[in-house]
Amino acid sequence: MGPPASALVVHVLLSLFLLVSSFPPQSTLSFDEGQNLFPSWRTLNSLPVSSLGSYRRPCSADRLPFEDMQNGSSDIMFMAEQSSFVEWLKFVRRSVHENPELAFEEFHTSALIRRELDNIGVSYRWPVAGTGVVASIGSGKPPFVALRADMDALPIQERVEWAHKSKTAGKMHACGHDAHVAMLLGAANLLKRRVEKLQGTVLLIFQPAEEGATGAMRMIEEGALGQAEAIFALHVSHAQPTGVVGLRAGPVLAGCGFFKAIVIGKGGHGAIPQNTIDPIAAASSIVQSLQHVVARESNPFDAQVVSVTMLDGGTAFNVIPDSVVIGGTFRAFTAEKFEALRRRIKEVIMKQAEVHRCKAEVDFLEETFPFSPPTVNDIHLNEYVKKVAGGVVGSQNVVEVKPMMGAEDFAFYTRVIPGVIYFLGIRNETCGSVHSPHSPLFSIDESVLHVGAALHAAIAEQYLEQARGSDNVQATQVMPP
Ligand SMILES: [Zn+2]
Ligand SMILES: [Zn+2]
């Protein structure tokens, strides 16, 4: 049995409020599209989702052979396995975990990252998108490849009792972004020690605000990708045992949007309904009809979700209220299906309200929660990651995963350049690392930290090696991050 519905509504509303209230005003930075090839945040945000991919700029990634790679993976893994390195990674992860910060408030986390980069001797640009950091290692010349980690925590009270439990009430790293920060810093450390092998430049992107899906957009708008021609990221996952890499080419995470509607009637006495226009009756029809959008209109083999998660109306047993608020989320794996859901959600709400003599207003909350497009892994680069990951963890520990209905703002980067997000297993019953992300019991098998660092480093180093050998790279350009 779950908690009562009213408690769920309060929880969802509170979460929404916390998320909304934590976002600063939107940036008003101007942007020269001609120079940067990036659409501005505003432009990006106002685009129909069906235009996904239209901003992908040309790059050499599609043409790279990814064959006969000199296998530096085992060297990198050997470096990563050293006990002093493993202990340092744990220290970093635990420091971030103890001091979780919500979206765009990652000030201490950002300072910690910069301090560690200073210690390693790696230069960086800061601030980017408020708290973001973009570090740079290598020749300072093309080719450029980007690695990304997210820094933000969630408004959740940690219920894991351990020595490094969150010190901030109501905030917790329950999605593993603390581990992502440690792993990317680990990659910075490894790559810095192998800088003479880098045949180009690695950009290490530490971004704010993945939860809420505006961090990546802000980073792109403020130029974080520079001249990077490909981008890679990992996310920890309980779906696989510790150290096992999960991959999927093509759509891997859903596009995500939210909606909120107000159904307006005319309130009055509950015993005299004929003098009212009842928004409760209208809202209940709307909720029922929204269930049919996916169940009756979409192909059962085409994964889509419409969930009503908020329903708020009425304050007394004998009063029909003036209005009811409905809210929820919708998910799909292609831009077209996503657009179709959006159109139908609005139609259903407006027309069902009309049937019940009510009015309705539908808001997709794009200013606050921009639509997160489906995350689509580049097919060619996915094969590349598969090969490199096989060299790091052994090919028997690289598996194909199924698409997931969760969303990732990594998708925004892959609208600009090709990329791959892959999943690094952390499931380990012996240390309690079994709870799903966003659970107050979420924990991580820390023995995976050096594996993530090695994966990042190997993927970047060998990408540059391959790209350098391709004829599409202009070696004379210089572009610090
Ligand atoms: Zn999350
Ligand atoms: Zn996450």
Image (cartoon, helix red, strand yellow):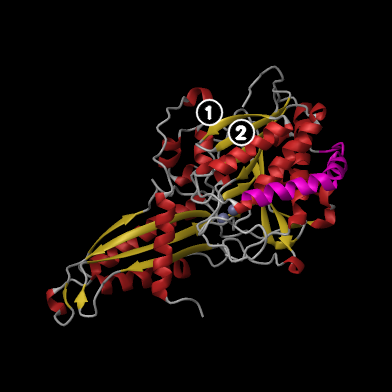
The kind of residue tagged 2 is: Val
Residue 139: where, in percent of width, then height? 73, 23
Instruction: Give the farthest residue toward the left.
Output: 275
SS at badge 2: strand
Span colored in magenta:
67-96
Position of residue 147 relative to residue 29, above or below, is below
Q: Is residue 91 magenta?
A: yes
At horizontal 28% and vertical 64% (from top left) the residue drawn is 351
The crowd level at tag 1 (other Cα within 10 Å; few <14, some 14-19, many 20+) is some
SS at badge 1: loop
Could you tell me what secondary structure mostly forms the magenta stretch?
A: helix
Residue 81 visible from this viewpoint? no
Residue 21: where, in percent of width, then height? 40, 50
Residue 473, image quadrant: top right
Going from N to C along the chain, the mark reached first, 2 or 1, is 1
Tally of numbered tags: 2
- Which quarter of the rendered image does ligand 1 occupy? bottom right
Position of residue 79 relative to residue 444, above or below, is above
Residue at which label 1 appears: 37
The crowd level at tag 2 (other Cα within 10 Å; few <14, some 14-19, many 20+) is many
Residue 114: where, in percent of width, then height? 63, 35
Circles 2 and 1, Cβ within 8 Å, touching? The answer is no
Residue 383: where, in percent of width, then height? 75, 46
Asked if residue 445 lies left or right of residue 406, the reply is right
The kind of residue tagged 1 is: Leu
Residue at which label 2 appears: 134
At horizontal 12% and vertical 75% (from top left) the residue drawn is 275
Position of residue 126 relative to residue 422, above or below, is above
Residue 398 visible from this viewpoint? yes
Instruction: Give the farthest residue toward the top.
Output: 476
